[in-house]
Image (cartoon, grey):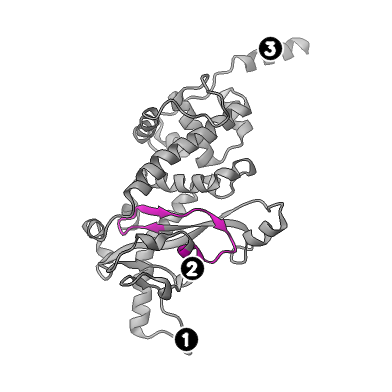
Amino acid sequence: MEKLQHEMAAVHKHRIAMSIDDIKYDQEKMLLYTSFPYDIFEIVVATVQRFQPLNYQAGWNVTSVSLEDQVLIALMKLRLNLRDLDLADRFCVSRGTISNIINTIICALHEIFYKGIMVRLGMPSQVKCKGSMPKSFEDFGSARASIDCTEITQDVPSDFRRQSASYSNYKSRHTIKALTAVAPNGSCVFVSSLYPGSVSDANIVQHSRFLDNLIPGDLILADKGFNIHDKMPSGVQLNIPPFLVNKTHFTHSEADLCYKIARNRIHVERVNERFKNYQILNHIPANYRSLSTKIMQLCACLVNLQAPLLKEIA
């Protein structure tokens, strides 16, 4: 028995760590672990390389894992929400090293793709939107974006006041949520910070300063939860489905408007579905809660790097 234990210990000691080299030629595995084919993964890594040396969040550098594999670890965390212990075992490092890598790479990618691209470039102008507008938007030619809120489940906060704020009556659980805006071409162009689940969609629109991006002549598509006509900037139009008030059914024109709005809002709904392909957005672990907003905003940027959404909708 003692000999067997020594042999098992020796095998464990000399185990080969997982590496990007193991999966880069297997597209199915690349999509499973990272959500990207290898050529897009290479672009992400090359972008991070330009910003070295990295500012490691734990205060000490990680030198035992290549940058490619560090990016792989962070993407695996986002994509599959594997436990740190699982990742530590796969890559033959400590849990502390895994935590340091994930915190550092997420912050670096957020700085590059969210702050450096989405925020810096801002929402595309109405002219740019028209240049890439699908045919389905022909009835909404001045549309800048479709908006929606997406919710993420979280553990019950220990603080009683935060418990009350985070409880979502709609989801019947404790959540946090963000406002997202999707351009007519299917690109996510705005992601707010995360708010407690009890905050109304209308209040998030106001507090997130999304409306500051709009100019006269713009059109925004939304669902009935965004009944904020009185909050829209001057000259900006909001199209939401009509309400059934003192009647049992819609007129033909109202029903037609409902159909057209729903047909074009499918863009933002599909983007939100893609968000949830990043399993970490189904439940952010408590030890990464401080990164919640960065994780949400980064996942939106990573969705933009994936295959065009319009091919799915067409």
Q: Nearer the viewer, mark 1 or mark 2?
A: 2
Position of the C terminus by quadrant: bottom left
In the rendering, which numbered label is found on residue 7?
3
Start-end of magenta stretch: 181-206
Return the disc, 2 or 3, that comes first in the chain's sequence. Answer: 3
**Horizontal relation, residue 69 to residue 85: left or right:** left
Three-letter amino acid code at the position of disc 1: Val
Q: Are marks 2 and 3 in contact (CB under 8 Å)?
A: no
Q: What separation in Å lies between label 1 and label 3 (alpha carbons)?
A: 76 Å
| Residue at the (56%, 41%) spot, across then down | 81
The type of residue carrying mark 2 is Ala
10 Å neighbourhood of mark 2: few (<14), some, or many (≥20)?
A: some
Q: Position of residue 264 (x, y in %)?
A: 34, 65
Q: Which image quarter holds the N terminus?
A: top right
Quickly name the residue at label 2.
202
Rendered view: 169 above or below 13: below
Return the mark for residue 160: none
Question: Which kind of residue does numbered mark 3 sit on?
Answer: Glu
Q: Most extreme residue toward the top, as rendered? A: 3
**Element class at badge 3:** helix
Q: Is residue 9 magenta?
A: no
Camera-nearest label, 1 or 3: 1
Q: Measure how far apart labels 1 and 2 are at the Cα level.
A: 20 Å
